[in-house]
Image: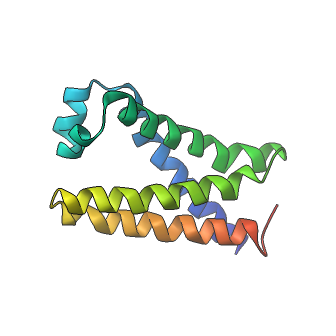
């Protein structure tokens, strides 16, 4: 189970790379690559979404590796689960249903990691 949780954490941490893109790319580039949902948020909102994903990337991996503030790992997973619910809603509002399965899978992985790290497999 420990291996499965680490795989989940690494998969979710990879989401941080897309967060880095959201945090740094020009808004027109984001609109072109990610879709019209970018227009639903002010530029600072898009940047905050991106930086939140980057922060979660570090919180999923570094605390357990350094054995410091390990509570951040399940908290980050919980935050990402909530972000995936919001992302699915935004995609559905834009009739981008093909993007929702990715949100559902990432939601499930985030819930799994949060459950494991808050519960029986906490650090």
How is the protein colored in the picture?
A: rainbow
Callout count: 0
Residue 120 picture quarter:
bottom right
73 or 37, nearer to the observer: 37
Give 99 or 43, whichever is nearer the viewer.
43
Q: Is residue 64 above or below residue 3?
A: above
Q: Position of residue 117 (x, y in %)?
A: 72, 65
Image position of 45 with respect to 120: above or below: above
Q: From the top left corner, tell me how far across and down residue 23 is, in percent.
A: 41, 30
Q: Is residue 49 left or right of residue 3?
A: left
At 31% from the left edge and 32% from the top edge, which residue is drawn? 42
User: Which residue occupies 70% across, 71% down?
Assistant: 116
Most foreground residue, 10 or 24: 24
Asked which quadrant contains residue 63, the reply is top right
Q: Residue at x 66, y 45 (%)?
A: 59
Q: Residue at x 19, y 45 (%)?
A: 35
Q: Is residue 52 above or below residue 3?
A: above
Quarter of the image where the C terminus is located? bottom right
Q: Is residue 65 left or right of residue 112?
A: right
Residue 117's place in the image compared with 61, above or below, is: below
* Residue 29 pos. (x, y %): 21, 29
Quarter of the image with the N terminus in it:
bottom right
Residue 78: image location, x then y, percent: 59, 60
Q: Is residue 123 left or right of residue 60?
A: right
């Amino acid at each position: 189970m420990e291996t499965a949780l680490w795989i989940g954490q690494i998969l979710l941490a990879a989401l941080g790379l897309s967060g880095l893109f959201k945090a740094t790319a020009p808004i027109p580039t984001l609109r072109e690559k990610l879709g019209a949902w970018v227009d639903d948020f002010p530029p600072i909102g898009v940047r905050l979404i991106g930086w939140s994903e980057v922060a979660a990337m570090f919180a999923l991996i570094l605390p357990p590796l350094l054995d410091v503030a390990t509570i951040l790992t399940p908290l980050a997973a919980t935050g990402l689960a909530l972000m995936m619910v919001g992302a699915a809603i935004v995609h559905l509002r834009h009739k981008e249903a093909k993007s929702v399965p990715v949100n559902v899978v990432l939601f499930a992985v985030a819930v799994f990691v949060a459950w494991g790290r808050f519960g029986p497999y906490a650090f």
